[in-house]
Structure formats: structure tokens, C-alpha cells
Image (cartoon, grey):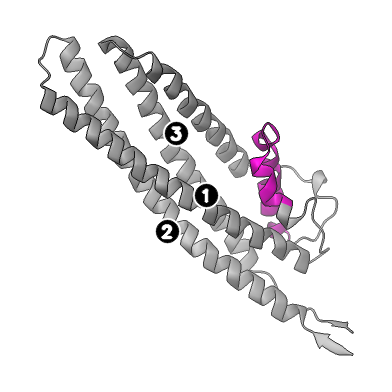
Amino acid sequence: MATVSVTETLEAGTRLAHSRFTVLRYLLVAFLLLKLLALGSAWAQHEMLVDVQRGGELTTEQASANDSRERLVSRVALLFFVGTAVCWLMWQHRAYANLRLIGLRDTEYTPGWSVGYWFIPLINLYRPYQITAELYRRSEIQNGRDPIGGLSGPPLVGVWWFVYIAWGATSRFIGTLAKDANTVPTLISATNAELAAHLLGGVVTVLALFVIVAIDRFQQGFPITDQVSVP
């Protein structure tokens, strides 16, 4: 009969989750800075177009420089978004798995599906919110109450998810506007939508930081005391 310490397992799990949280936090801060940069770039484009609408002249060099700047900012932001999303899923998987090492050692979903639901169309409009809300609440009460469905969703997670959905919808709307933007007024409309998307992207990033900081703080406070014996 060998003794496996749940203390060691939970301690290792929370330590790994915290390491991933640290990387994720830095990536979110970097993405936030990029959103602010993108907001400034889009505003410069907006002012340029408004000036043209008022009768100002736009040289080929100015238009080319604007397009190059917008394209560069967009590509770098996309790169950081993908990296941040991957890190978020890695952190979430570990943090969600930690719930099975404490308290009731039960969760509504599996750690694998806590990640998988992000990739299923339509379901990914609400299930990731439910999973994040569960992760938040179960971490807060050290997984000490069942069923978790009896607990209300945290307002912070609800606001974060609402803004996230709004950001996604606005970003998609930009693509629709951009396809038909071939006059100065329609280009201004598309740029206004871009400004709104960047603003929402910045807000959702700040809210995401609050969410992960809270969950990490809860899990770092997990008591490391239990032991079990297995063959």
C-alpha cells in the first residue's frame, strides 16, 4: 500500500496554475496596450477621413502610410490574441482540474470539456461563461458546496462575458462594413465601428484580468492538508 499525498498533488496543481496565470496576466497586459495603440491608430484614420470629407487633400503617401500602420497594428494584435487565447485555455484547464483535488472533488464538466466547449459553435456563446462562473464560485468556496447550480453567477464574470460577446459582434460587423466601404462616409462608418471594437476589446481585457486575478487568489488560498492512500 503506497501513500499518495493529495497535499502534494493539489500543491503542484495550484503552483502550475499560478505559473500559467502569471504568463497569462502579462499577455493580457500586452494585449491591452496593443488595443490602446490600435485605438490611437484608428482615431488617426478617423481624423484623416474627416479632414478629407471637409475638403482636405490626401496624398498617396499619407494613405499608404495609414494603411500600412493599420495593417501592422492589426496583425500584431491578432498574433497576441492567439497567444493569449492559447495561454488562457491552458490556465483554465489546470485551474478547473484543481477543483477535483479539493472539497467535494466534483465539477459540472470535465477539465477537457472546460476547454472544448470554446470551439463548439452556438454552445460557445454561453457554456464558457457557465464554466468560468463555476470555476470562480467553486474556487471561492473551495469546492465545498454541491450542486454548484444553486449558486448565482458572479457579477464580474457576467459583465466580462457580456462585453466579450459585444466585442465579438462588433468585430464581425466591421468586416461587413469594410467590404462595402468605398466612399469617404462609408469609410468613416467602418472606422467608427473599428474604434468601438478596440474600446470594447480594451474593456474586456481589463475585466478578464480582474477575473483571473480573483480565481488565482482563491486557489492560492486552498488549504493543503488532505491525504489519501491508494494501492
Q: CA distance from mark 2 to mark 3?
A: 19 Å
Q: CA distance from mark 1 to mark 3?
A: 17 Å
Give the dominant element type of the magenta stretch: helix, strand or loop: helix
Badge 3 element:
helix
Query: Upstream in the sequence, badge 1 or badge 3?
Result: 1
Q: Amino acid at mark 3?
A: Leu
Q: Quadrant of residue 67?
A: top left
Quadrant showing the N terminus: bottom right
Residue 85, numbered label: 1
The number of numbered discs placed on residues in the rendered structure image is: 3
Q: Closer to the camera: disc 2 or disc 1?
A: 1
Residue 200, numbered label: 3
Q: Closer to the camera: disc 1 or disc 3?
A: 1
Identify the residue under disc 2. 26
| Residue ID at (47%, 22%) | 173
Q: Give x and y (percent) for residue 21.
A: 53, 62
